[in-house]
Image (spheres, rainbow, N blue to C red):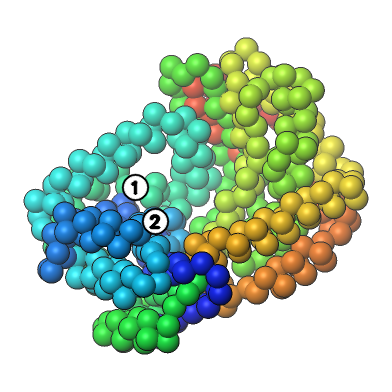
Amino acid sequence: GEKLRPDFVPGPPSAPGGFFGGPGSRHERAAESGAAHFIEHMSFKGTQRRDAGALARETDAIGGQINAYTTKELTCYYARCLDSHLHRAIDLLSDMLFHSRFAQGDVELERGVILEEIGMYEDTPEDLAAERLAAAVYQGSPLSRPILGKASTLNKMTGESLRAYQEAHYRPGNLVTALTGSFTPQAVEELRAILSELEPGHVPSCKGARYRPAFTVRRKPTEQNHLILAFPAFSYLDPRRYQLLLLNSILGGGVSSRLFQELREKRGLCYTTYSYVADHADTGLLGVYTALSPELEGEALDAACALLRELAEHGPTQEELERAREQAKASVLMGLESIQARMSHLGTSQLLYGSVLEQDDILDAYDAVTVSQLRQLAEQIFDFSQLSLSAVGRVAPAEEYAQRLSR
């Protein structure tokens, strides 16, 4: 059941490797909210063979880095090191991932660290606005919950409960390991052996999610108001994904994008504005973000909506499509220059898509996109009956935003 993605790259003697696991935060039940991320933290607190200090010293001793991150769809643990140290790096990573200690004292300590991390997000209005948006539009599904969990669920977690959660969710069937760079067949065999020791078993599935339009505001004494407008998009498994990424780029991807040109360059309303795609296995959204002083937000919202309606009605120009396509292709090619990015691409693709998208297939997919496809897509996505808004700052009541935007 386990999948291994080696990718030998001649060149620099570095060999990043990683484990990509099925359990992201959306695989948690409500009472388990924050478990996947908590386990990620606990992996650095010591194993049966090494305490936290030893893990840190050994990582530094091989001149590498070992890190991890949790998303809603998956958790990744990865190492970067020189090929001469790969054997030790694999040993360290697998020790952390499969033989964590979960000592109760460490759990208490690390809970405090995670609560501080939550506090940091609370103090970052841009992140808070995005988190509140997901909570509102995916209400009732696991996608609505924050990756970090919340104090009430974290306070109930123990070393035992976290260990049990890890054993139930880290199965050969939903783990992928990826290796890139300069490595030997021996390293591949080592990883195989590690994975083959895992108990096979049922891989827990997760509850589906569906976008529903919502308006949510959070008053906070910030200098600027942080606003996100959002529309439903689709899953990362949808074949129109490449059209969506190009449309997003034209709308708010770079300095030549419509949002940046209109809101910042032409009107001087804001310092920062962009659009983004947040896609999942079964749903997704396209968000438009800006931050500005409360006096200017009415004008900015009107201008952004006019721009979206214009894009829905007429679509982009051929020239805009070419620019966005060149940007996208360059980022694919340049992204693959980084061995770290290659490793991440291999593992994530295999886990989420069930196969690895080859570089040429991705470039071909971008080449196939036409202006008329993007016009149809814009018309479908910028449907104002499906509009959502999340605002954080010295904001008006939600009804006032709803009224302004329904005009």
Q: Disc 1 residue type?
A: Leu
Q: Residue at x 23, y 70 (%)?
A: 95
Determine which of the numbered discs, if any, sits on residue 148 in the image.
1
**Residue 19 to residue 161: above or below:** below
Q: Disc 2 residue type?
A: Thr
Residue 351 location, x and y as percent? 49, 72
Tell me where residue 234 sits by quadrant: bottom right
**Residue 55 to residue 227: above or below:** below
Can residue 395 be seen from the camera position used here? no
Mark closer to the chain start, 1 or 2: 2
The outermost residue toward the top is 295
Q: Residue at x 32, y 47 (%)?
A: 149
Q: Quadrant of the N terminus?
A: bottom left
Residue 328 location, x and y as percent? 72, 55
Give the residue number, with chain letter if any, for mark 2: 70
Tell me where residue 25 sits by quadrant: bottom left
Q: Is residue 182 left or right of residue 244?
A: left
